Image (spheres, grey):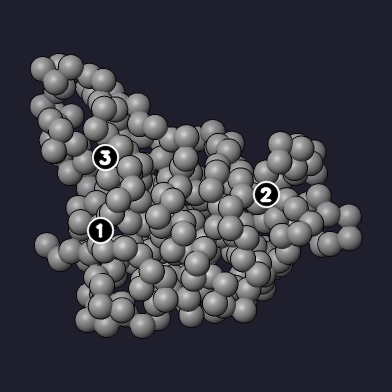
Amino acid sequence: MSKAEIAFIGGSGLYDIDGLTDTRQLTIDTPFGSPSDAITLGSLEGRRVAFLPRHGKGHRYMPTEIPVRANIYALKTLGVERIISISAVGSLREDIAPLDMVVPDQLIDRTRNRVNTFFGDGIVAHVGFADPFCSELRHALADTAPDTDAVVHNGGTYVVMEGPQFSTRAESELYRSWGANIIGMTALPEAKLAREAEMCYATLALVTDYDVWHQAEADVSVELVIANLLKNVENTRAMLPDVMTRIPHVRKCACQSALGSAIITSRDQITDQAKSRLSTIIGKYV
């Protein structure tokens, strides 16, 4: 099967990336169903990459419906070690304006209806998640983004809400009182599943609005999100080739061994079904 080392997961408005050469599309089945769409493989700046549109081309999946386990598992089968997620978000801070970019370093999980682990059904694992984003990959994004025309914020807390509805004003103010910086619907369970799969994960968050807390700005709406997102996507397309040149060829982060001491189930108690289902993820440990 064809291989890739770095994957881009595109959010709303980003359904392909420019500059890929030697491309082909793959349809992959996984033990967790089919991914959101066919995966495009190609070369960018001399490195093999994969691209997957999170919501499917034409935006067919709402956040709760995204087959995240299938997406991450499929990328893992291709040999992907690092995932760059691109997501539209709302700002919870005055100094983070629409059309800015944020490279967050923390998450708050407010999702309710999403499966957030590969494990269960015969095997239990507890991975560390204190720092949900890979520091190596974060730095590559944060160091590249200032070369664009956008204002870039390095660090910040991303609240992940369930959706598909936007926040109430009370919720928006609550998240602000917690010290959160941005709000969106898609970084989880992606980040948790990527950690279980020992893949580096970082998010480039594209700010489209001020959610609903700002007294002087328009409330978030689909029209506002799309209008600002299309402007930000152009900046994103321009920076991706430069990101590739800043990502180290050899990983030195702890992401690559996240499962090393996380599987708590006795090896002789792990079912054959669990071993088969998760072979791509746990094969080197079981």
Mark 2–mark 1 CB contact (< 8 Å): no
Judged left or right of residue 2, residue 147 is right
In the displayed structure, 187 sits above or below 238; it is above
The x and y percentages for residue 30 are 22, 48
The x and y percentages for residue 213 are 81, 50
Mark 3–mark 1 CB contact (< 8 Å): no
The amino acid beneath tag 2 is Asn
The amino acid beneath tag 3 is Ser
The x and y percentages for residue 138 are 46, 56
Which quadrant of the rendered structure holds the N terminus? bottom left
**Residue at image mark 3:** 257
Residue at x 20%, y 56% (from the top left corner): 79
Mark 2–mark 3 CB contact (< 8 Å): no
Residue at x 75%, y 53% (from the top left corner): 93
Between the C-alphas of marks 2 and 1, the distance is 31 Å
In the displayed structure, 32 sits above or below 88; it is above
Question: Farthest right residue?
Answer: 216
Tag 2 secondary structure: loop
Question: Farthest front residue?
Answer: 252
Which numbered circle lies on residue 275?
none
Q: In terms of image quadrants, where is residue 9?
A: bottom left
Which quadrant of the rendered structure holds the C terminus? top left
**Residue at image mark 2:** 181
Q: Earlier in the sequence, mark 2 or mark 1?
A: 2
Callout in the foreground (2, 1)? 1
Q: Earlier in the sequence, mark 3 or mark 1?
A: 1
